[in-house]
Image (tube, rainbow, N blue to C red):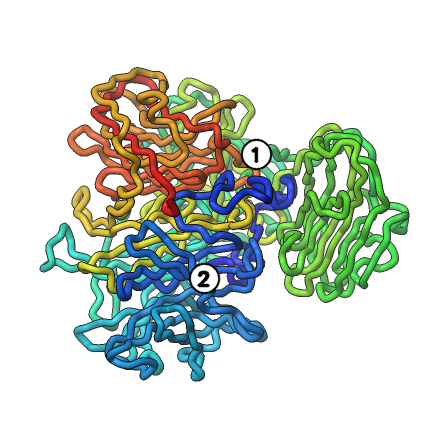
Amino acid sequence: MSSGRVSRHARIRMIAAVATVCALSAAPLAPQAVAADSPPYTETYRPQFHFTPEKNWMNDPNGLVYYKGEYHLFYQYNPNGNSWGDMSWGHAVSKDLVHWEELPLALSHDDEEMVFSGSAVVDRDNTTGFGTKKNPAMVAIYTSYFKDTGIQAQSLAYSTDRGRTWTKYQGNPVIDIGSKEFRDPKVQWYAPTKSWVMTVSLSTEHKVRFYTSRNLKDWELQSEFGPQGATGGVWECPDLFPLAVDGDENNIKWVLVVSMNPGGVAGGSGSQYFVGDFDGKKFTAEDKGTYTPPTGTVVQDFEGSDFGTWTTTGTAFGDAPAAGALAGQGTVAGYDGTGLANSFHSGDGTTGTLTSPEFTVDSSYLNFKVGGGLHPHVAGTVLEQGDPPAGTVLADFEAGGYGGWTTTGDAFGSAPATGTLPNQQEVSGFRGSGLVNTYLNGDSTTGTLTSPEFTIDKKHINFLIGGGNHPSGSANPTALELVVDGQVVRSATGKDAEALNWASWDVSDLAGRKARLRVVDDNTGGWGHLNVDHIMLSDAKAQPVSQETSVNLIVDGQVVRSATGSNSENLDWASFDLRPYAGKKARIQIVDMNNAGWGHILADRFTEADRPAKSVVQRADWADYGKDYYAAVSWEDAPGGKRYMVGWMSNWDYSGAVPTSPWRGAQSAPREMALRTVDGRVTLTSKPVSGLASLRQSRPATAAGVTIRSTSKPLIGRAARGKALDIEATFSLKDADRFGLKVRTGAGGEETVIGYDAVAQELYVDRTRSGAVDFSSTFPGVQSAPLKAVKGKVKLRILVDWSSVEVFGGSGEAVITDQIFPDPASQGVEIFAENGSVKLDQARVWHLDSYRD
């Protein structure tokens, strides 16, 4: 199972259910899409042609195999709730990869293990002895997560009734290397050696291992691949398969798909791939050569004896550029020349800024190198702590006791803490001399702290919060909760840091209601504590203080572009698109406002250029460039030698916070994969399975020969409106900078923009105004994929569902999958062009039925 499983990183934590940035705190707890009595599959955001379980949490696809006329889709499933936990294998089958039937639970968790991700095969030669040659067993190879040790090992289960019932093998596990980061086996039959091949990940080492076996029980290690390509997060859910290049069966290449979280091309989760050769034992990726960034005008290379006209605040950057690593710092690499900006002066505890003089934007891109901490700029933060907004203080924990608050358990003691407790990292950011700190006697203590009842008479409840990231509703929370009529209606948690920061709940809808506040510490593991201070009612929202390590572009006093490091001392290329700010005054500001782990930033080689530089992540190959295509794996034994692939349509950054109920999680539309030569390179391409056309309603609405200039207008009219659509469109380039289609448009400016940037030669999806986006700060944004026009034309295939868009550009070499959560009334489709003209050669829009109809 990918990501949300147990790991040393907070974002890859066991309680993956609500992994947003600190401030899911600002949103209502467990937002409900519709009333609880809505019939199944009619809920507001329920996908109509993407598979979802009727209820409960789903993530990775598992065990994809075709047998006796059925495509089997197993998947990571929580049979007991709508958040990650109790991992088991759910099960669905289809005859055409379009119409799905949900079946009973296949492989269940038990007291000893959770059943993480894996694969399934049909043992036709009965190599295991689990079945017979007349009735071969279907064998699942999965990762056992052993609850008592945290060890991940590979195990077997088998079925002799077409996957309806399963028996776990008594000899489990079949591979156990004693690792807590060893998972997601993909197994296939390799005919040339008459053996089974297992592809499995060593997740934190960024490696894939290959094992072979004659009987699925006894395995021999053959080789390892990696680290290579993008390595910003753990590697998971590997898949390996052969494909003919350009349909030539005499030219076979192998594709290794490796999912990664975090560090995907669009941020958070992503699925990258490598093309190469496999001989039954070893995979060798093709050499992609070296990278040369675009040339341009260097505006700051930090090669001087001081910062020149750039100005500093604080102490983090020192008085002059650094000559590499500073005292106490690991090896710094990837910078050019002999100098760079390095905010590690006196360690991570220092803060400050380094700012350029004002300049007029007169180039297309600003390219630069960046490294250091992964602490992005968050909109709405301020660089300096000011006084909180005026209001009524409910608790400041300054009186030496808890006042009328009542405690249970042993985490709170008889009085508030006065700061850092024994053996705790330094606690900062609280006001005055007291705060709630549940680290009393370490993380092992638990309890609750509950306020007296009060009346909500202002628009906001502001508070300072830090400590562990274990959200309310998860198995063992560390959370501040707002309780009304016995129900938790708002919740906040820390983000695995001791520093407290402002968070806020909008409670205007609860005006006049009686409420209580409750601090809950039910966690005895890592970061099993919470810090809380200065809770107050106010008509204004408190602004959190920046904790970023970032490079920012400031225009008109606002941060309009930002980049951060990847928790690495290696600098890599980044780029700001300056075109929207042409002629405006701007500044570059390098910011370090973080004094925790990786609380520093590295920067070098600021260069004005006509084209963007690309980072290692951008130069990697991706099966999908959207935010919501992860753990992608393919079906074994598909008819006609076809290779079909499906991915989990979500992202660990916010998967537990998306506003869906009683289910959470969807699979992408299955895709037919191919290798094609695109712009001289062998490229993995995908297109929706042909069976999807069976859901199209009658004739399409059409448009042809439409030229528009610098405007947006409805496409075709009401005939193209809808919530579930299949759109094909071909554009001829003219002089427009950007053009394309907007879908799910509606009142209040709601729109999901699907466009082509002719200057950058990129396909993009902009979901910043797509509907509900405020449940996570990492959800809104723009995702882009490289795509060159062919003979002056750009072809798009767009699948629009009730809560997603999937965009296939060109021959399927550029794909972007994004969830969206628009108002049901937002059903418009528009065509647009910016800064010039474009011609729509042809568009066809089909309405799609539900696969359940």
Give the residue number, with chain letter if any, for mark 1.
379
Q: Is residue 749 above or below residue 321?
A: above
**x 46%, y 42%: residue:** 603
In this orientation, does residue 750 appear? yes
Q: Is residue 552 above or below residue 254?
A: above
C-alpha gap between disc 2 and disc 1: 39 Å
- Name the kind of residue labelled 1 in the image: Ala
In this orientation, does residue 610 appear? no
**x 25%, y 51%: residue:** 672
Residue 470: x and y in percent read: 64, 55
Front residue (pair 764, 599):
764
Residue 783: x and y in percent read: 39, 38
Taking the image as shown, residue 39 lies to the left or right of residue 162, namely right
Taking the image as shown, residue 728 lies to the left or right of residue 495, namely left
Residue 504: x and y in percent read: 69, 38
Taking the image as shown, residue 495 lies to the left or right of residue 733, namely right
Camera-near label (2 vs 1) is 2
Front residue (pair 429, 457):
457
How many residues crowd around disc 2 within 10 Å: few (fewer than 14), some, or many (20 or more)? many
Q: Which quadrant of the figure has residue 35?
A: top right
Callout 2 secondary element: strand
- Name the kind of residue labelled 2 in the image: Gly
Q: Which quadrant of the figure has residue 131?
A: bottom left
Callout 1 secondary element: loop
Q: Which quadrant of the figure has residue 392?
A: top right
Residue 529: x and y in percent read: 71, 58
Give the residue number, with chain letter if any, for mark 2.
90
Question: Could you tell me if the residues under marks 2 and 1 are in contact, i.e. CB atoms within 8 Å?
Answer: no
**Which label's residue is closer to the chain start, 2 or 1?**
2
Count of residue discs: 2
**x 36%, y 59%: residue:** 93
